Structure formats: C-alpha cells, structure tokens
Amino acid sequence: MPSLDSNGVANGQLGQLRHIPLSYDSENSNASARALILALRPEWLSPDSSIEFVPFKDGITNTLLKAINRKEGLSQDEIDKEAVLLRAYGHGTDVLIDRHRETQNHELLMKCGLAPELLARFNNGMIYRYIRGTATQPADLRTPSIYLAVARRLAQWHATVPCIYETPAQKNGVNGTSNGHHEAVIGHAAPGKPSPNVWTVMQKWILALPTKTEAQRARQASLQQELIKLIDELSQRPGLGENGLVFAHCDLLSGNVIVEPQDLSSTKNGDSLRKEVSFIDYEYATPSPAAFDLANHFAEWGGFDCDFTVLPTRAQRLEFIREYIHTYFSLLPGKPDTVDEEAEAQKLLAEVDIFRGVPGFYWGIWALIQATISHIDFDYAEYAEIRLGEYWGWREAGKSNGTSTGKELSIRERRWAQLE
C-alpha cells in the first residue's frame, strides 16, 4: 500500500480480501452462520469444539453475531481471543451503503491500527476479529470518563486517517453503476469537494427515495431543495482537515463504541478513571466536516428513543471538544509549532452548533428508505419523522436569530441551548 498522507488515498489502492462464496440466511441463522465460520476456521470442526453464536441486538441495519468455540478447559479470555464477529448486511441496504468502500474503510483503519483484523467477506457480509470490551449504552455516552475517551479516539481518527477518494476512472462511471445521470448528480453535489463525501452520500440517498406516490415525489422534491440549501450554506465552510474534510465515522451511536478492558497497570498507577474506547462498524464512514461527525455523535446521546432531554449541554460539548482539540493537534502530522487550543476549541464548538440540525436530516432520509426495504423489526417510518423533526426544529430556531417569532423552540433546541 502507498504511504498514507493527509491528502487522502485513491479508491482501489488497498489489498484484496478473501471471499467465501456463501451467504448468511436469517431464516436459517445457526446453520448458515456455522457454514460460514467453518469455511473460515475448518479446525473448529474438531470433536472437542463447541461452536456458539451470541447475537448483538443494538443495531438497526445489520445482523451481528459473535462466534465462539467453547472448547473444554479454555478460560473466557482464551475463548475471546479466538472469537470472531460475523456481520450480515441488512436486506436491501446496498442502496444506502457502498459495500466495496466499506471493506476499503476497514482495511485502511486496520493499517492505521484503529480496526480489528478483517478476515473475510462473504456474499452478504464480512467476518472480522472480535474486539474485547463492552459496547456502550446511550447512558454510558453521557459519562465523562467515556465521552472524553470518545473525544480522544475520534480526534485520532480525524488527525491521522487519510480520506479515501474516488479515482478519475471511477468518477467517469467505471465503477459498476448503471445510472450515469444520477452518478453525475451525486458526484457534483458539493462543487469543489473531492468525492465521495457526506454531501454526495445524502444526494445519493435522496435519489433513492421511494417515488411511487404523489406524496412521496413531493417529499423527495422538498428534501432535494433542502439539501441544495444545506450544501450552499455549509459545504464550503472552513474546517479541520484537507479541504475542510476528515475521515469521519458518521455513525457513532452507542453500539459502535466499545469500552476497552481496563489496563491493570494504569489502575495501579492511580489512573483508574481514564477509559479507552474503540469504534466498530465503518459502513457509513466517509470524508466529512469534523463538526458533522461530532454533532452526529452528540445526537446519539439520546439513543434510538431520541430522548432530547439528555443531549449534551453547552458545558458538556465544550469539555468534549477541548479534549478532542488537544488530542487532534498532538497527533496531527505536520502540526503547526504553536496552537491556541482554546481558540480552536471555541471555533469548533461554534461549528458543531451550526451543524447540529444536519444529523436529523441525514438519518431522516436514511430511515425513509429503510422503511421500504428493511426486514428488521423497527419502526423506521416513525424514526424518520422524529429525525427530520430535529432538522425542521433547527431551521425554525435559525429564523429567530435571538428574537421572538411567536413559536416555541423544540425540546431539542431548548436542551441544546442549555448552558450547564
């Protein structure tokens, strides 16, 4: 692989991964998962093996299973060291997610020491090494020791991982896509910005919205106009990274934040409160303004229930951002000799405030599509309305500019404005 630099790497420069020509079948979960694991680990077929699958329930896009071999005499630690994760893609999600790019994201993060080893792809998913640790719950994200750890890890991503952009050949349509007009619209969604990026992703999703009814067509047109407005207002703003873009996770919900096991040596040294975290699931990772990635994570403090009353106050956001900025500039290659960290923190705090409505728009569009394709038991249609409501609440708050408009601010906007 070529050297990683801050200007990004081109698609297609990462390694080739083993492909297992089998599929996971949710209707025949255990047997199909077992066949996949044995194709990867034929030694698990030995008489002393005992294969088990532990489901993870936190996601609403994919199926995630932990595969373990509970051989007699092994400790839990020894079992976990050999465990793998099997992730099967949600039904129809190729319309939302570029799976080839997801594999490249994972491989790139592996090279940077920020992802577990990717072991194989199969027809509708991937298998990678299990990360020891505990997935957080939404309430955990609001714990200072954990949110400061998230700030440090996110800063490491943004400072050290190069963005992956399309090659000229792919931009000209040599990437297997069938609709050249749509690809041109998507690729040029944010003029002057390398593709793909968070703006091109949202454009792709809007073009994929259902349009069978007049109401659906009207909604698509309305959301398209809002995206044009957002791109005009926000896409050219200055920010961290090359071209104002960083390699962003874009899906830092609680289930994707893993608290690593405590290092006993750090406990002995009196640093027992300091936590470390890892991130998993890189299917939405794409070049993005850092402020979007942070605003998106802060929105996840409320979980899938969208409890707006527990979103971070201004004081909590600033504490997070100060930790983020300190780490970012300590790790940034070719960093300036002197950095006014407090000024940078205040600047990013203001940017996150500006971007706070965009995650609702992003996930609202996503949920409208999921409502038509997903087989997962989740009310995507209701979720879409709640998340789009965040966006409209932000727009309404922006009209006031500190003056009364006669309309009460939404619960989310009132919480966001809370100082302590």
Image: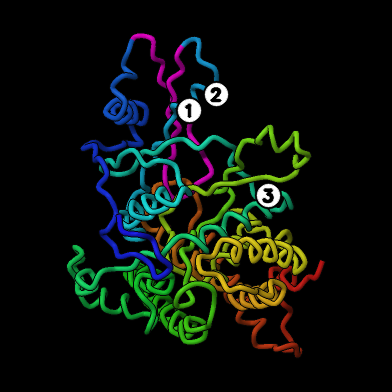
Q: Secondary structure at mark 2?
A: helix
Residue at 48% over, 29% down: 54
Q: In the image shown, does 198 or 132 lie closer to the viewer?
A: 132
401 displayed left or right of 17 = right
Circle on res. 81: 1
Residue at 48% over, 84% down: 236
Task: Name which residue type carries label 2.
Answer: Asp
115 displayed left or right of 388 = left
Residue at 31% over, 36% down: 25
Residue beneath label 3, please?
146
| Residue 153 image offset from top left, x and y in percent | 58, 54
| Residue 141 image offset from top left, x and y in percent | 67, 51
Which comes before the other along the chain, label 3 or label 2? 2
Magenta region? 47-71
Task: Name which residue type carries label 1.
Answer: Lys
Which comes before the other along the chain, label 3 or label 1? 1
274 displayed left or right of 211 = right
Whole-angstrom CA distance, mark 2 to mark 1, is 6 Å
Residue at 37% over, 48% down: 90
Q: Residues within 10 Å of mark 3 (few under 14, many from 20)?
A: many
The answer to whether one can see residue 381 in this image is no
Whole-angstrom CA distance, mark 3 to mark 2, is 23 Å
Residue beneath label 2, please?
77
Q: In the image shown, does 250 or 373 lie closer to the viewer?
A: 250
With respect to residue 69, does 179 lie above or below? Answer: below
Check if mark 2's residue and mark 1's residue have beta carbons within 8 Å.
yes
